[in-house]
Image: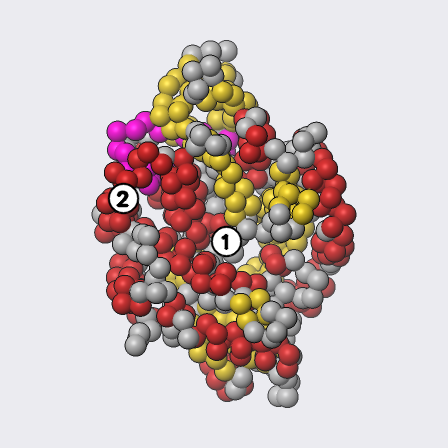
Amino acid sequence: MSNRENKTDVILIGAGIMSATLGTLLKELAPDWNITVFEKLDEAGEESSNAWNNAGTGHAALCELNYTVEKSDGSVDISKAIKINEQFQVSMQFWSYLVNSKLINNPQDFIMPLPHISMVQGEQNVAFLKKRFEALSKNPLFKGMEFSDDPAKLMEWIPLIMQDRPADEAIAATKIDTGTDVNFGALTCMLFDHLKTQNVDINYKHSVESIKRTKDGLWEVKVHDIDGCKAEYHTAKFVFLGAGGGSLELLQKSGIPEGKHIGGFPISGLFLSCKNQEVVEQHHAKVYGKAKVGAPPMSVPHLDTRYIDNKKSLLFGPFAGFSPKFLKNGSNMDLIASVKPHNITTLLAAGIKEMALTKYLIQQLMLSKEQRMEELREFIPNAKSEDWDIVVAGQRVQVIKDTEAGGKGTLQFGTEVVSAADGSIAALLGASPGASTAVHVMLEVIKKCFPQHVKEWEPKIKEMIPSYGVSLMQNPELLHEIHNSTAETLGLSEKEPVYS
């Protein structure tokens, strides 16, 4: 066993899209800084970032109905949709910068143009979708969106969904051609390949066992080298916990007060994957429906064209599952181990408040394949069981914490950053929209954790993200310019709408 200690400037724990993004940003802003990465698995992007472990949607709120809520007065609140769309534009600008700077090649290996469609059934839902369309289409971020309840037009947009449907069914959809399918696993690997050329020390098969503050204010990380069967000690001024579901345990081990009174609830996902290529070729879009009454936001059903391993695929889901693991490659003891004296009342309060979620998960777990096929048939009426297989997706740990608005034990469905007051350590927790907004989220980490450098770094940040510090919604000309340039650089321009 080795007790050698290694000093570095920055330690990134977890080799997913978040660490890849933060590492790449920091190397552009502070090229002289030494960065060390630890990943438990044997390669990058194998947990939540892996293409089979997430929906691959470039989340820009173009089709996801859970980002636009109908208020009690009947109007539609689009504020969250605007926020998420602007955040995705930041990612698109950064990816374009990486391509233009030759830091990564072949954007088609990780991003493809794909229409984003919202589809609803039933007169009440059709009325909601029309109101949503009217609210969004007035906003420059959503220019190019179309609405139709005409079966002939819908047959053009979504032929697989419209086949064998009753002629009198109330059905409508919105379509926008600027949507994307993103392979975050491929992007993660590209970013780590680039970081390797920048002398970043990337250590696979290294599991972080403990993390503690040293007397001189540094962070000491004890790491187990799985292949070498030895312990290593590394110290850094700044540590980022980007280990997906594993971040909560590491945050608790750090002992910072900001990590107390936070718990996690793991939810796994299942998808139906089509193995009949003739069926796959009949669909070309990401089509999001509306979550059923009482179902949680992450249960929004969607039928997705995907591009994975240079092959067009078709997936439907997600169906929720339950495992006590916090990572797909985690331990069955993860959930129990996360219960601490400081968060037990928070967790118990959530258990009482979230009885509907518990009931929903139990119902989902008990579904047979044929029952899952029946849900698919609400999208594809003539779907055949023999054409579809069940695929297990990644684990997501939903954050549970005490909030002013929701009270004790409130279940959060977004992406959260928890950082120490002095900015020396930060952890990423939560789920969707996650990877799509990674660049925005990591810039927030940089602002919180390196405030003393932000002013000197600002010119470089603006070079990478021209809209930095500006609302695109309020600057349609800049939005138009950025839309065109990112679409051209990333190979998406053939579907670009005309902006007026």
Q: Residue at x 26, y 61 (%)?
A: 485
Residue 423 x/y as whole percent: 43, 32
The total number of labels drawn is 2
Residue pictured at 48% horizontal, 26% vertical: 206
Q: Name the amino acid type tagged 2.
A: Glu
Q: Front-most of 179 and 74?
A: 74
Q: Nearer the viewer, mark 2 or mark 1?
A: 2
Q: Residue at x 37, y 19 (%)?
A: 7
Q: Check the image and name the residue furthest to the front.
A: 404
User: Which dot marks residue 458?
Assistant: 2
Q: Earlier in the sequence, mark 2 or mark 1?
A: 1
The answer to whether residue 352 is above or below residue 259 is below
For the residue pair 276 and 1, the one nearer the viewer reads as 1
Q: Position of residue 188 (x, y in %)?
A: 40, 44
Residue 307 occupies quadrant? bottom left
Relative height, residue 329 to residue 67 (above, below): above
Secondary structure found at label 2? helix
- Between the C-alphas of marks 2 and 1, the distance is 26 Å
Q: Residues within 10 Å of mark 2 (few under 14, many from 20)?
A: some
Assign a secondary structure to mark 1.
Answer: loop
Mark sitting on residue 433: 1
Which range of residues does the magenta coloring cover?
Answer: 22-44
Residue 385, how many percent across, how many down? Answer: 65, 65
Q: Is residue 44 visible?
A: no
Residue 343 visible in image: yes
Asked whether 374 or 356 is in front, the reply is 356
| Residue at the image position 69 percent from the left and 66 percent from the top | 293
Above or below 188: residue 78: below
Within 10 Å of disc 1 (Cα), the crowding (few <14, some 14-19, many 20+) is some
Q: Is residue 129 left or right of residue 93?
A: right
The three-letter code of the residue at mark 1 reads Pro
